[in-house]
Every structure is written in structure tokens, then in C-alpha cells.
Image (spheres, grey):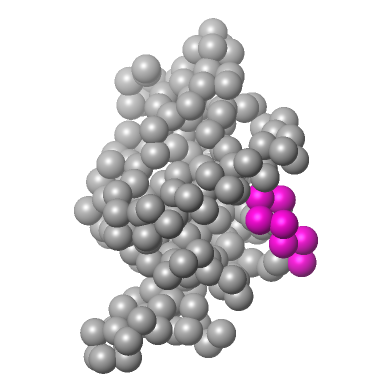
Amino acid sequence: MTSPFRRPTAEELAAAHDATIPDVAAPGLRVLFCGINPGLWSGATGRHFARPGNRFWPALHRSGFTPRQLRPDEQDELLGYGLGITNVVARTTARADELTAEEYRVGGAALVDRVERLRPRVLAVLGIGAYRAAFGRPKARVGPQPEGIGTTAVWVLPNPSGLNAHYTPDGIAAEFRRLREAVEAGAAAEAGGGGAAGAAEADGR
């Protein structure tokens, strides 16, 4: 595993192909963020969203989920904020388009089992294409989804990869912020005696 600030070598990146890295997760989180699958930088370093240019960590801070921008090597600090990271597909690839439809289906089923076990308030899937493929929802759109997983609400957020040209950094941060505000509104409603209204109801669906 590389040091926090050293760029992986070409040999380390090549060796990372098909590797897996541990989730950052615990029971009862506010939000469990779910990437598509780890990239080579993540496989080489053991850290999620590790490649420079990935917009996950900036969006997390700009949206108010974290008080400062964390580095990938500080990923375990997310648990203290009630946040976690997992992936639809565990294996590392250079690009998400290397994954097969079967891997998405199998990964989606495994993700459901994981969510039912950990019971986060919200599962936030980072990528509309990944959500559609993993859950068989071809018409799904970014935002809160009508179907949850047990007591967990499901949201879809934009893929924060620097390769995603459909969203600017401001646009990604805005979608993260919308989720955070809904989660906080749902928690306030429950604290006020509103019952398990959840983040989805807080967003008006």
C-alpha cells in the first residue's frame, strides 16, 4: 500500500486490477455512500475515491457533510460523522465500463443484503447508470427513489468521477447538499415526534 501522498507507480496500478478494498461502514449510519466500483488508484492505495480529480471529497465538504475536505487517507474519519462508503461491485477496474451486466445484478443483490444488515438511514448510490443496472430501474433519475430497502431510503447522486461531464463540481455539490438537507430534516422530524418519516418524506415524496 502506498503512502498518503505518493502517486502509485505504473506497476502498482497494474497490480491493483481486480483487487478489492474494505468498506468504510458500520451499523446505523446517517448515509452510506455507494460507489460503482473501486478504480485502480483506490485498489493500489486501499482508499476510496483516491484518484486526483475525483470530486467526491470536495462535494462532501462543500455540501456540509464534513466540516473540512478530508483526504482519501482520512476516510475512516467519516464514521464519526455518521457516514460510510461501499460499492456496488467490489472488484477494481480501470473504468466502470469494464463491468458486466451480471456483475451489476449480483452486486445489487449483495448491496441489498448489506443495507438490510447495516440499516443506514439513507443509501446514496453514486451514479444513475449503476443504480439502473444494479436494481433494474431503467427509468430512475437522480434524487430520492420511490423504493427503499427495508427502513433505508434510497437516493441516487451523480457519479463524482472526473470523467462525468454531465455535472460540474457545483452541480455535484448541490445534489449532495439536497441529500444532506433532507437527511437533517428527517432527523428533526423524528426528534420532534414525527415518527420514522425518513429522508424521503422530508424531501416531499
Q: Residue at x 24, y 84 (%)?
A: 191
Asked whether residue 181 is in view, the answer is no
Asked if residue 101 is positioned above or below residue 130 in the image, the reply reads above
In this rendering, position of residue 7 left or right of residue 190: right
Nearer the observer, 131 or 179: 131
Q: Residue at x 48, y 84 (%)?
A: 201
The residues colored magenta run 133-139
- Residue 137: say if magenta: yes
The image shows residue 150 at horizontal and vertical percentages of 46, 67
Nearer the observer, 29 or 180: 29
Q: Residue furthest bottom?
A: 193
The image shows residue 102 at horizontal and vertical percentages of 72, 38
Q: Residue at x 43, y 57 (%)?
A: 116
In this rendering, position of residue 103 left or right of residue 173: right
Asked if residue 193 is positioned above or below residue 84 in the image, the reply reads below
In this rendering, position of residue 169 left or right of residue 188: right
Q: Quadrant of the N terminus?
A: top left
- Residue 153: say if magenta: no
Residue 37 occupies quadrant: top right
Asked whether residue 178 is in view, the answer is yes
